[in-house]
Image (spheres, rainbow, N blue to C red):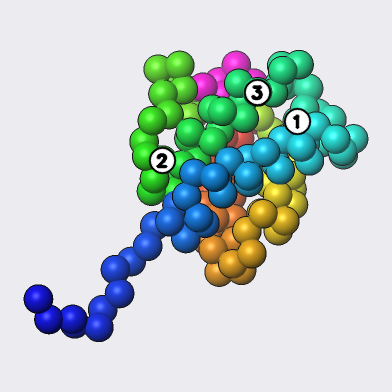
Amino acid sequence: MADTGAETPQTPFQRIGGADAVRALVMRFYDVMDGDPAFARLRSIHGDDLAPMRASLTGFLSGWMGGPRDWFGSGKCVMSAHTPFVIDANLRDQWLAAMRIALDEAVPDADLRALLDGGFERVADRMVRV
């Protein structure tokens, strides 16, 4: 087969470095949220044990970025999984701020950071119900 010179487009999952890199992003996000008082309200809607949430977000983001789709979210879509929570603009902003810190620290590719940030912002905006 002749080489056409065209590159195969990579998914964000591939660009970030696969499952380990997604996991590192998620771990950093929860570390930021858990350790910084600026995110106290965001932290308060999570259980004491963040391990289940770390695993869930890793699975969701892996599929969202074009990797393995093995997130089941307790049989719910990501939107309905968040219906028990009052998500207003302030909570959305806390989530985005914590994720942006994690992105800056865990994703060296500036173009990929911008792509992911735009996607996170769109999803977070749709979560706001107040």
Q: Position of residue 88 (x, y in %)?
A: 69, 33
Give the distance between the C-alpha atoms of the residues marked 2 and 3, in whole angstroms: 19 Å
User: Residue under circle 3?
Assistant: 51
Q: Quadrant of residue 127?
A: top right
Q: Residue furthest left?
A: 1
Q: Is residue 29 above or below residue 44?
A: below
User: Residue under circle 2?
Assistant: 63
Residue in the image at 43% along x and 56% along y: 14
Q: The disc labelled 3 sits on which kind of residue?
A: Ala
Whether residue 83 appears in magenta in the rendering, the answer is yes
Q: Earlier in the sequence, mark 2 or mark 1?
A: 1
Where residue 68 is drawn, which disc sits there?
Answer: none
Q: Which residues are magenta?
A: 81-85
Q: Earlier in the sequence, mark 1 or mark 3?
A: 1
Residue in the image at 37% along x and 39% along y: 68
Residue in the image at 71% along x and 43% along y: 28
Q: For numbered disc 1, what is the local secondary structure?
A: helix
Q: Quadrant of residue 92?
A: top right
Q: The disc labelled 1 sits on which kind of residue?
A: Leu
Q: For numbered disc 2, what is the local secondary structure?
A: helix
Give the distance between the C-alpha atoms of the residues marked 2 and 1, in whole angstroms: 24 Å
Q: Position of residue 66 (x, y in %)?
A: 38, 48
The mark closer to the camera, 2 or 1, is 2
